[in-house]
Amino acid sequence: QRLKAAVHYTVGCLCEEVEEDKDVQFSKQSIAAISDITFRQCEIFAKDLEMFARHAKRTTVTSEDVKLLARRSNSLLKYITQKSEELASSNMEQKEKKKKKSSTAKRERTPGEQEAAVTENEDSNMA
């Protein structure tokens, strides 16, 4: 119910923006209808995404599932692909930074500290 109200609020805000830009008016009934259709479509999208993941024998929805869902809208597919690539490159950069930090931290330790860290790591892996 709260999610439905949030969708209705967001649709109302978007309609207000369109009203200002295009000099048109939306009735409360039309905003309610757009909200209802939007909510129903989101439910359909969610079910489709779950089915795509299940078909691939996964329990997690991936960006590839979202791309498959958006395949009928070229502009949406292009946008999602672009954002997916941006996220992937950002994740790679973060992983590289973590690797550099951990290798720098290992180099800065004295040999005795390195040995203690290795022993500590081995003990935690055995547990």
Image (cartoon, rainbow, N blue to C red):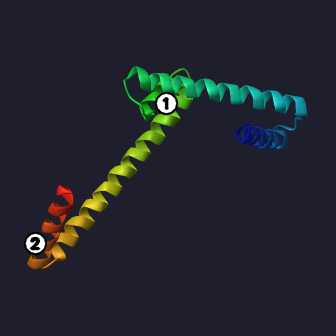
Q: Of the residues under marks 2 and 1, which one precedes in the sequence?
A: 1
**Can you say whether 71 is above or below 61 in the image?**
above
Q: Quadrant of residue 42?
A: top right
Q: Amino acid at mark 1?
A: Val
Quarter of the picture holding the N terminus: top right
Work out which residue is located at the far front of the displayed protein and give it: 127
* Number of numbered discs on residues: 2
Task: In this rendered view, identify the residue nearer to me: 10 or 52.
Answer: 52
Left or right of residue 47: residue 18: right
Q: Badge 1: how crowded within 10 Å, few (<14), some, or many (20+)?
A: many
Q: Secondary structure at mark 2?
A: helix
Task: Say which mark, if any, is on residue 66.
Answer: 1
Task: In this rendered view, identify the residue nearer to me: 82 or 13.
Answer: 13
Q: Amino acid at mark 2?
A: Glu
Residue appearing at x 76%, y 28% in the figure? 36
Q: Quadrant of residue 44?
A: top right
Residue appearing at x 56%, y 24% in the figure? 47
Q: Position of residue 73 (x, y in %)?
A: 56, 24
**Alpha carbon of mark 2 to alpha carbon of mark 1: how far?**
46 Å
Camera-nearest label, 2 or 1: 2
Residue appearing at x 52%, y 36% in the figure? 79
Q: Position of residue 12 (x, y in %)?
A: 80, 40
**Dot 2 corresponds to which residue?**
115
Residue appearing at x 77%, y 32% in the figure? 35
Left or right of residue 96: residue 86: right
Q: Position of residue 23 (x, y in %)?
A: 87, 38
**Can you say whether 56 is above or below 110 in the image?**
above
**Can you say whether 98 is above or below 38 in the image?**
below
Q: Badge 2: how crowded within 10 Å, few (<14), some, or many (20+)?
A: few
Q: Position of residue 99 (x, y in %)?
A: 25, 60
Quarter of the picture holding the C terminus: bottom left
**Can you say whether 120 is above or below 44 in the image?**
below
